Amino acid sequence: MMHLFEIRCRDPHTRARCGVLKTPHGDIHTPSFVAVGTQATVKAVGPDDLNKIGIQVLIANTYHLHLRPGEDVIAQLGGLHRFMGWDGPIMTDSGGFQAFSLGAAIEHGVGKIASIFPDEVEAAERGGHLRKARQGQSLVKITEEGIEFRSHLDGSPHKFTPENTIDIQRKLGADIIFVLDECTSPLHDYEYTKRAMERTHRWAVRALEYFKRPSPPAPLPFVETGEGWPQGRGEGQALFGIVQGGAYKDLREQSAKFISALDFDGFGIGGSVGRSKEDLYRVLDWTIPLLPEEKPRHLLGIGEIEDIFHAVARGVDLFDCVAPTRMARNGALWVKDAQDFRVNITNSMYKRDPRPIAPDCECYTCQNFSRAYLHHLFIAKEILAMRLATIHNLYFLESLMREIRRAIQESALIELAAMWGITLGKPS
Ligand SMILES: [Zn+2]
């Protein structure tokens, strides 16, 4: 039998590896960035742009798509791939994170949570339902059965369970789906984090059992079985478990052992990874050595360039992150030779700058437009600014990932990181 994930090479000086993850909609070469397409679109760019940039895989959001337009609408229109006109690999998360972050915003105060989950709080504020919640009408309740929550759009009641989030994600039809988990924040204490982790483990067992039943309740007409895809499982979908445990060593270890003993196709590393970069790296050091070597690992929601190097060096294969697209829309354009790897194009120093954003960049934006033009579009608030900036940032990140994969093949990840001013230690 062929494997879903094949490791092709390893960097002998770190835990980094290169591999190929096979899906019914094509191969993903890892380590890979996963572009965030929350609402079944990568904000400001279309699938033609994404193909030209070399984006390999997208992650859409179950919470948002369940609320609008609804999984039944998407299933009737042929599933996510056809709906959004993207025929490459797609992942969907389980929605637990959004249900949680909206709930946490109420429990701990929006101000504190906004710095941890800015997108979710922004969405909730737009929906106007945080105001109601502040007046005592809770948006979220977590029970053994699942997560009860109210829509941030219209306040309507909904429930996510380990079973129905599988059903919803089957209807959406992504190639890789995630189990429902309860995500804790750095504001939760040890006892609560432990209880939430144990509940997440019970949910993982339920989700996997439900997923493996021979005839899913909503068989999809459009899913082909790709070469090497495991037969008879989830109608061509792969299911990833999620390791939780907050920033606590013993909990992370317990969770990694428990979740990796279950027959998932891959593993997400989720939840609060602490308050600092060092906390994140420690969580990866505790977790990854306990995960099965032969299965893919997805770090949920990171994305500064320094973090990418450190995560890949610790054995992360996939990561998703809103940073390149969100920062692009704010005029923060990624370049190699600048403070924090970015220039703020709205700065008046670019008003007459004839150069492209980055001198060596081969993206559509840098090949055709000057910094002065980008500066003008941002100042004039023209919508083309968002598209051109997003194309550049995504291309920049994909180029970096290609460099990283090549460096791993040449056993030279530490040297590549050093060229970016980043020091990678040997694994502990
Ligand atoms: Zn560019």
Image (cartoon, rainbow, N blue to C red):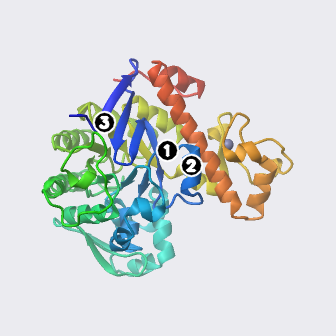
- Label 2 packing within 10 angstroms: few (<14), some (14-19), many (20+): many
Pick whichever of labels 2 and 3 is earlier in the sequence: 3
Q: Is there any visible trace of residue 419 in the rendered image?
A: yes
* Residue at image mark 1: 303
Position in image of residue 405 (x %, y %)? 47, 29
Q: Earlier in the sequence, mark 2 or mark 1?
A: 1
Dividing the picture into quarters, in which one does residue 130 lie?
Answer: bottom left
How far apart marks 2 and 1 lie (CA) works out to: 8 Å
Q: Amino acid at mark 1?
A: Gly
Element carrying mark 3: strand
Hey, what amino acid is under mark 2?
Answer: Pro
Q: Say which mark, if any, is on residue 25.
A: none
Q: Is residue 88 above or below residue 219?
A: above
- The quadrant of the picture occupied by the N terminus is top left
Point out the tag, 1 or 3, that comes first from the N-terminus: 3
Percent position (x, y) of residue 166? 24, 61
Ligand 1 near label 3 (Cβ, under 8 Å)?
no
Image x and y of residue 195, in percent: 19, 55
Disc 3: which residue: 5
